[in-house]
Structures are given as C-alpha cells and as structure tokens.
Image (spheres, rainbow, N blue to C red):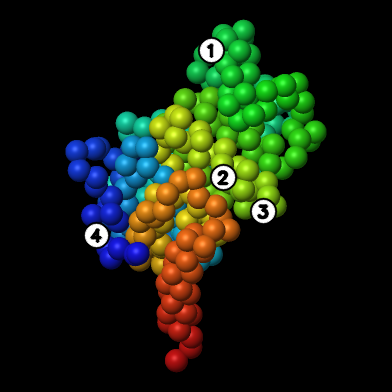
Amino acid sequence: MSAPLTEQATGRIEGQRPAIRLEAVSKIYGQGRTALLALDQVSLSVAPGEFVCLLGASGCGKSTLLSLVAGLDRATAGHIDADDSRVALMFQEPALFPWLTVSANVEMALRAKGVGKQERRDRAAEFLDIVHLGGFGKKRPHELSGGMRQRVALARALAQDADVLLMDEPFGALDAMTRDLLHDELERIWRERSLSVLFVTHNVREAVRLGDRVVLLSSRPGRVVEDFPVELQRPRRTDSGEVAELAGEITGRLRQEVLRHARQEEPA
Ligand SMILES: Nc1ncnc2c1ncn2[C@@H]1O[C@H](COP(=O)(O)OP(=O)(O)OP(=O)(O)O)[C@@H](O)[C@H]1O
C-alpha cells in the first residue's frame, strides 16, 4: 500500500497550486555547540481540499513544522509557501479564555477582523451550530467537557475564515469515544467547507482514519521518510480491519525508523 518518495511526498498534484508547500525546509534551534537540527530538508505539500496527517516519533519536529507553516517561527533554510491560504491553528489544549463565554471566545476571531457586534453574535452562533454546540453560547469553558471545548476551538478556527487548518494533536487528550465523535465531525466539516488540513498525531489509527495521506517523519532531525496514500473508502472506522491493516504497516515502518535512530544514538 505504501508509496516510495515520489510526487506524493513533494506533493504536487497536477494542475493545482498547493494550499501549503514546503521545499527543503530546515530548522536549527540555537547556535554553535548547542545548535539542534530539528528539521532537515523537509519537502511536503498539501493540495487544496486535501487531508494530510503527519506522523512521527516524539521530538521529530512535527510541532516545529506546524509553527513554521503558521508563520510563528522562521525556517533556517528552504522555502514555505502558504501565502494564498488563510491558516488557523488548533492545539491539544483548546486555549479558550476562561472568563469569556463560549460565544465570546468564538467572536474574538471575528472582532479581530472588525466585524460589528450583532453580526459577530449571529456568526458565532452559526459556527457553534456547525460544531453542534448551538445553545451553548452563554456557557463558560469550564462548564463544558474536554470534547466540547475542542469543538469551541474548532468553531473559533472556522470563524477566522480559514481555508487551511493546522492541527497539532487536537484530540490527543480526549477519551476514545469522544475522539471518535470528533473524527466524524471534523471529517464532515472538512468536506462541507473544502478545507485543507495538516493534522499532527502520534496515533497511527487516527492518521489512517482521517488522512488522504499519512506522511511519516523520521526521528530527529525530522525528514520525510515515506508517504502512505490512504485509499480506503470514507467514512472509515478506527476499529475496522482495513484501518488496522494499514495502521499495522505504518507502525512497522515507524518502529524501524525509531530503532534505526536509537542505534545511531548508542555509544560506540
Ligand atoms: N523553541 C525551541 N528551542 C529549542 N529547541 C526546541 C524548541 N522547540 C522545539 N525544540 C526541539 O526541537 C525538537 C523538535 O521538537 P517538536 O516539538 O517540534 O517535536 P514534536 O515531533 O512535535 O514532538 P512531540 O511529538 O513530542 O510533541 C525537539 O528536540 C525539541 O526539544
């Protein structure tokens, strides 16, 4: 099922300008003897409307890559092109303002765009409806479950009028049942709004459940090792045999990569 490093990994889909494109991107933190190479010549693209999952061992630079794409930090070398895209970020922690209502949290994204008060309220209500939280606008974040808070974060990301979602383990802290529900929600919203998604996860089955492609990064420094197209029919079930089969193949490859890295790190 897996594809070697081909056009898929460098991501060009003929005739379409990618929503995100990284070309030979490297990132070094620090300088001199303490310099740390976090990403090494990563080339990767996400086509418009594509859902790409990024998988790799802890510390391989997944979050670094997202922060570079979001423009929160600068690459040391290489080129990132996401200029034509409106990008929103979502983290494992929903990072809501606890003193604001759910609606006001979503409205923040609209306020930043200069949208007037009444229109802000109406549009926040629409976005909350989209994530199935209609009627919860007046609650405070602490009155909601973890899954509901992540829905609010998703509504806020949508309110930014984003066409690209960068998601850093957004469901990592949730129980399996809630995660499952949010997979369904996210898939529905991704389709309805033709979003492009770059989704970081440690969870191989989650990556296969959601992704059009699963891109595997090597242990630090992060490099693209392999690009797995996921050609299973949607909607998929995390516990289905076919998801398990491809997840098993990817896990095997990930394990090889982690072992190779561990051997390199062993003292001679
Ligand atoms: N601001 C920083 N300054 C120095 N080193 C950093 C900084 N941010 C990340 N690193 C280092 O860069 C490497 C990659 O970190 P990053 O958080 O991107 O990895 P990750 O794959 O997202 O990890 P995890 O899966 O554990 O979240 C790690 O060794 C980390 O310690």
Q: Is residue 120 left or right of residue 73?
A: right
Helix, strand or loop at label 1? It is loop
Q: Are the residues tagged 3 and 1 within 8 Å (C-beta)? A: no
Q: Nearer the viewer, mark 4 or mark 2?
A: 2
Mark 1, residue position: 115
Given the image, on which type of amino acid does mark 2 rest?
His
Could you say where residue 177 lies in the image, as x and y percent from the top left? 68, 50
Mark 3–mark 4 Cα distance, whole angstroms, equals: 34 Å
Identify the residue at horizontal 48%, vertical 85% (top origin). Answer: 266
Helix, strand or loop at label 3? It is helix
Given the image, on which type of amino acid does mark 4 rest?
Thr
For this rendering, which residue is in front, 71 or 193?
A: 193
Q: Rate crowding at label 3 as few (under 14), some (14 to 19) or many (20 or more) other CA atoms within 10 Å.
A: few
Helix, strand or loop at label 4? It is loop
Given the image, on which type of amino acid does mark 1 rest?
Val
Q: Which of marks 2 and 1 is in front?
A: 2
Q: Rate crowding at label 1 as few (under 14), some (14 to 19) or many (20 or more) other CA atoms within 10 Å.
A: some
Q: In this view, does 144 lie to the left or right of 29?
A: right
Q: Are the residues tagged 3 and 4 within 8 Å (C-beta)? A: no
Mark 2, residue position: 183
Per the rendering, the mark at residue 6 is 4
Could you say where residue 262 lies in the image, as x and y percent from the top left? 48, 80
| First of labels 2, 1 by sequence position | 1
| First of labels 3, 1 by sequence position | 1
Q: State which quarter of the image contains the C terminus.
A: bottom left
Given the image, on which type of amino acid does mark 3 rest?
Ala
Mark 3, residue position: 176
Residue extending farthest bottom:
268
